[in-house]
């Protein structure tokens, strides 16, 4: 089992599970959101283009995203598999990815769909804090750092992502429901989708995912 897609709303826990799958199976996680944020930090043209959309909680245009994924998948480290986190987010992206897989004579193995109700999502997103140095994620209520504002792992400063405020989070969830949620049926039809309850706690959820991935 080596090519895995994570599907779920913002705040559903895709990033957390992706990290654990990476650790356990030794395959890289490709997070389009992380790639955009990294580009933004470095001030690249791609990052600057993406910024306006991200800050508003809107999707970055499909063409830009697809080009980025094509480029990322040309690297050596994805030969034995990868986890997609945050891509595809639209039917157009999913179709472009299907085409790309075909060209590469590859197949997707599983789509892990993590389901979480909207009120829980807003709570999780607005309480989320991220380490500026190492990227580790905390939650002010659910998973607080030992010392407020400081990363347990590396001592870095914890910040709130620009798009993690309540208003932008609401919009991201609306955008998810209108543009990304149709992918659930898309992958159900392909027989690859496995649905998980995302409210059961990260450890239990990971055990369940592992039992499906083998
Ligand atoms: P989350 O899953 O918590 O919303 P991400 O880090 O995956 O956060 O994405 C943050 C933002 O990056 C999105 O709101 C969007 O603007 C942009 N983005 C990331 N991936 C995509 C994608 N596949 N298509 C379009 N925009 C994307
Ligand atoms: Zn850290």
Image (cartoon, grey):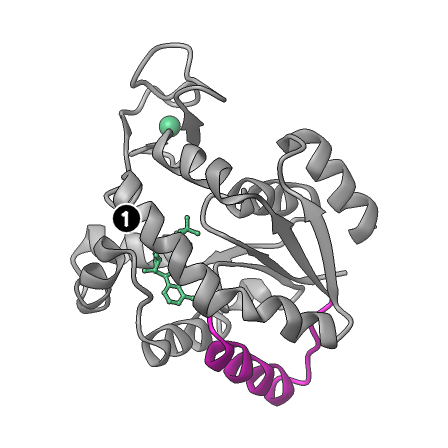
In the rendered view, does 95 fall on the left or right side of 153? right
| Residue under the point 30% across and 62% down | 58
Does residue 126 lie above or below 83 as drawn?
above
So how many labels did they put on this image?
1
Q: Name the residue that disc number 1 marks.
A: 168
Helix, strand or loop status at disc 1: helix
Q: Is there any visible trace of residue 89 in the rendered image? A: no
The foreground one among 65 and 141 is: 141
Q: Which residues are magenta?
A: 90-109
Does residue 200 lie above or below 59 as drawn?
above
The foreground one among 26 and 130 is: 130
| Residue under the point 47% across and 43% down | 11
Q: Position of residue 70 (x, y in %)?
A: 45, 77
> Could you say which quadrant of the image residue 146 lies in?
top left
The foreground one among 118 and 206 is: 118
In the rendered view, does 195 fall on the left or right side of 29? right
The foreground one among 83 and 140 is: 140
Q: Position of residue 139 (x, y in %)?
A: 42, 26
Q: Is residue 131 magenta?
A: no
Does residue 99 lie above or below 44 as drawn?
below
| Residue under the point 65% across and 49% down | 26
């Amino acid at each position: 089992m080596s090519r895995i897609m994570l599907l779920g709303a913002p705040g559903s826990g895709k990033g957390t599970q992706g990290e654990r799958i990476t650790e356990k199976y030794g395959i890289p996680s490709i997070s389009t959101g992380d790639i955009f944020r990294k580009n933004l930090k470095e001030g690249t043209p791609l990052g600057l283009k993406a910024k306006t959309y991200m800050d508003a909680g809107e999707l970055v245009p499909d063409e830009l995203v697809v080009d980025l994924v094509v480029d990322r998948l040309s690297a050596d480290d994805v030969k034995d598999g990868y986890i997609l986190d945050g891509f595809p987010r639209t039917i157009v992206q999913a179709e472009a990815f299907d085409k790309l897989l075909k060209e590469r004579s590859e197949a997707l193995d599983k789509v892990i769909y993590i389901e979480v109700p909207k009120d829980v999502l807003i709570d999780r997103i607005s309480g989320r804090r991220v380490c500026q140095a190492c990227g580790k994620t905390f939650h002010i209520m659910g998973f607080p750092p030992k010392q407020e504002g400081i990363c347990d792992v590396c001592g870095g400063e914890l910040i709130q992502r620009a798009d993690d405020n309540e208003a932008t989070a609401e919009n991201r969830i609306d955008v998810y429901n209108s543009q990304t949620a149709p992918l659930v049926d898309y992958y159900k039809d392909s027989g690859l989708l496995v649905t998980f309850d995302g409210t059961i706690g990260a450890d239990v959820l990971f055990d369940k995912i592992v039992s499906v991935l083998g």
